[in-house]
Structure formats: C-alpha cells, structure tokens
Image (spheres, rainbow, N blue to C red):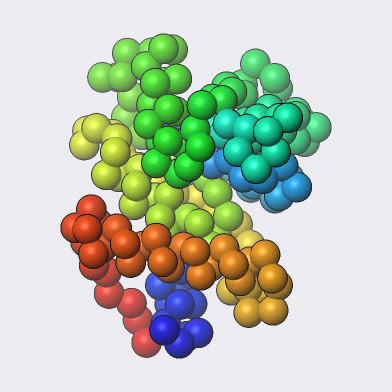
Amino acid sequence: MDLDKIDAILFSENYGKAVKSDFAIVCGTAPEYAKTRAEIADSFYKKGCTEKIIASGAAVSDKSVTECSVLKNELIKLGVPEEDVIEEPRAYDTIQNMTCSLTEICKRTDIMRVESITVITEPFHIKRAFLLAKMLFPEFIKIYGYTEGVAFQRKAWKTDERLNKCVKNEMEILKQLIDKGRIEDFEYED
C-alpha cells in the first residue's frame, strides 16, 4: 500500500474535537511512550471534557511495571488529581483496553446511566481504538475518539523507526479485522 493511502486511512479523520464524556479511556503503551498519551489525556481533561480518566494497561513490554501505573503517574505530574484517574491493570492489548475498562466503569456506576465514553490514544492508533470501542461497548453508549499531534505523526512515521513500525502494525491489524468481518471495510479519500 502506498504512503498516501496509509496517510488517508490512519490520519485523515478528525479526532481532535473534545466532546464531554462520562468517562475517558487512555490506551496503554510501553512506559517510554506513556508521556505522549498522558499529555493528550491531560489536555482532554483540562478542557473539562471528563471527570474520570481510566488509564488502561497491564505489564506488557516491561514486566516490572503496569502501563496504567505509568500513565497515572504521568497524568498526576501534569496536574490531573489522583482521585480522577482510575487504574485498569489487566489489559494486554487494545481490545482488552476496552473490555477491561468497561468492567472498571461497571464497578463504579450503573452502566445504563453512562451516555458517552471517549477513547484517547496517539494519532496512529486512534482509528482502530475508536472502531473497537464502537464494536465492544453497548450500542446505547456514544463513543468518541480524541487525539492530538496528527500532523506531526502523519509526517514523522515515514522516518521515525518506532512510528513506522506502529503504523505498519496498525494497517496489518485493520486488514485482519476487515478480512475477518469484525469491522466494515472503510473508504478513504485520495
């Protein structure tokens, strides 16, 4: 697939609009990249768009620390009150970020009263995270996606080794989900 098509699929939709939500879920990542996702979640929080952030992620790449604890620490450093961050330490992948976060929400409130949830992650990851959330959460809950830094990642993934691997991985997983009929094939603009 050519670079323009990848850009159109992963970086063309606008997930930059912050919409007030009952909960926000920030998807886990390796500890060395947690600050980026925490900064995006902090921005969303400080816009007054949620009162509770679920930091999701098990001890995946670094077995000595959970991704959620690193995210929580980063959020607290940025000024998010500790009591407004919920740790979800069981998720080993994006699907589990959603399902395990749903469990955390159900522990804290009547799920039938939840009207909206925003999924927060980096630009290269937001399309899949958003689509999975829409698929896995109850239909009566409105799902939003939020990210920042799209223009930077759209440019940087072509030269940055980590982002390049992440983008290629996202495209492969999206293709698998489409091939298995889990998500609908989507159109992209040329």
Residue at 54% across, 41% down: 27
Residue at 48% across, 42% down: 93
Q: Is residue 117 left or right of residue 82?
A: left
* In the foreground, 82 or 176: 176
Q: Is residue 70 depicted above or below 144 in this figure? A: above
Q: Position of residue 162 (x, y in %)?
A: 67, 64
Q: Is residue 121 depicted above or below 1 in this figure? A: above
Q: Position of residue 28 (x, y in %)?
A: 58, 40
Q: Is residue 41 left or right of residue 180?
A: right
Quadrant showing the N terminus = bottom left
| Residue 42 appears in the figure | no
| Residue 142 appears in the figure | yes
Q: Is residue 53 depicted above or below 143 in this figure? A: above
Quadrant showing the C terminus = bottom left
Q: Position of residue 125 (x, y in %)?
A: 50, 57
Q: Looking at the image, how many numbered discs can be counted on the residues?
A: 0
Q: Is residue 132 left or right of residue 39?
A: left
On the image, which quarter does residue 55 sit in? Answer: top right
Residue at 49% across, 77% down: 7
Q: Residue furthest right?
A: 77
Q: Position of residue 14 (x, y in %)?
A: 45, 63
* In the foreground, 184 or 90: 90
Residue at 32% across, 13% down: 110
